[in-house]
Each structure stands twice: as structure tokens, then as C-alpha cells.
Amino acid sequence: MKIRKVHRRNRYRYNVNRKNLNRKHKSTGKIKDPVFKKLWEERKRPRTNFKEMGLSVNPNKTIGIPNYKAERLRLTKLVNGFVEEQLTEEELQEFKPKRGEVINQLEELAKEKGDTKLRLPKGVVQHLSYFLDKYQLNYKAMVMDRRNHYQWTWKQFRSKIKQFMSIPEQFNKYLLKKNLPINENLSWSEYESDSEWK
């Protein structure tokens, strides 16, 4: 007996915009980087665009995984005089990309130090500011405090307070509230010392 295949009936979906769907399928995606967007040529393939900019589409193919066995074999043949080393003119000439300024611009952007987006939650800031008000930088006393609900150790306190101090946006607010000088070392006894716990 033959097994009967059940075919689902194709139904036309009227709610789908075919024009947008085709556009989405054909598009290679939007370029967000302004340097790339300016120098990207739509008519060329992505691979040629990358090559002209001096960039690599696939670094594994560009650099390649070294084959030590083949390299040793080639060297032994060269040493023994079986093969003469032939360097083509293309190998002698260094490859210079047409749009090489992209690499320089990207390197400059990479060197620029971006602003850290790290911000501590309000609850943690309030918690730490309470301990700083009461004990300044005496971590041993902070551990023994009744309001140490999270049971932080002295090292955890130190790291969290250092983190809080490294965020000027939040720490400057705390300093202004306490009428303390901004951008100056505080005159607290254990500030900038590592020998708090004895």
C-alpha cells in the first residue's frame, strides 16, 4: 500500500509587503560607521570594497594558518639546491590599497580613549556613601557595621569604593554634597594606602 503525502495548501499572505520583503533580502545591511559609509561603493562587491580599503573580509584566508611541515620541506629543498627561489615582481612590490586612508582613520579611532559607560546603581551608591560618611576609608570598621547587610569583606568594600571613586560623574556629586574639594586627594587617613587591614 502506498503512503499518501499530505500537502498543506499554499495561501497567499495579503498582509505581507512584498516590496519591503525583497528589499530586505537584497540589502547587505546598513553601515553604521561614518568612515566606512563615506568610502563604501555600493556598486562594488563587499570583498572588493574591503580589499581596496586595505582590510580583510576573512582574516583566516588573508594571514592563513602556518603550515610548518610544508615550510620545512621548502627550506630543505632550497638548502640542498633542488629548487631555486623565485620571487615574482608582485611579491617584491608591496600591496598599496586604493583607499588606504581608511586604515589610518580606523587606527586613530581605536587609539582614542572612549568614555566608560559604567555607572553604579543608586542603591549601591547610597550604601557606599553611608559607609564613607561614617567611617571614611576604615574598611575594618565597615565590615563590623550592622548595616553591612550584604556581608561584604574589607577587600570587597575597598574594590567597590575604588570603583565608586573612579566614576567622576557619581563621586563628584557625593563630594559636592559633603562640601569636599573636587579633583583633589582626600585627607582621609587610609586614602591611597594598601595597609588598611593589620
Image (tube, helix red, strand yellow):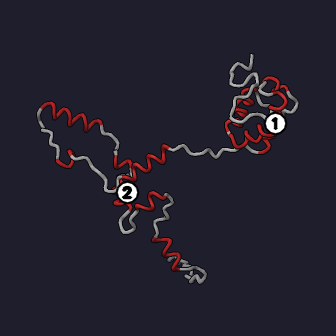
In the rendered view, does 3 fall on the left or right side of 88? right
> Extreme right residue here?
146
- Which residue is under mark 1? 178
Mark 1 crowdedness (10 Å alpha carbons): few <14, some 14-19, many ≥20? few
| Residue under the image location 34 percent in, 45 percent down | 63
Query: In the rendered structure, which amino acid carries the disc numbered 1?
Result: Lys
Q: Is the residue 149 above or below the residue 189 in the image?
A: below
On the image, the x and y values in percent for residue 133 come to 83, 32
In the rendered view, does 29 fall on the left or right side of 102? right
In the foreground, 171 or 131:
171
Could you say which quadrant of the image residue 45 lies in? bottom left
In the rendered view, does 137 fall on the left or right side of 53? right
Helix, strand or loop under label 1: loop
On the image, the x and y values in percent for residue 98 come to 31, 56
- Which residue is under mark 2? 50
Q: Which one is closest to the eye, mark 2 or mark 1?
A: 1
Helix, strand or loop under label 2: helix
On the image, the x and y values in percent for residue 43 come to 37, 69
In the foreground, 9 or 176:
176
Q: Is the residue 126 above or below the residue 198 in the image?
A: below
> Extreme top residue here?
198
Q: Is the residue 31 above or below the residue 86 in the image?
A: below
**C-alpha gap between disc 2 and disc 1:** 55 Å
| Residue under the image location 34 percent in, 48 percent down | 62
In the rendered view, does 152 fall on the left or right side of 68? right
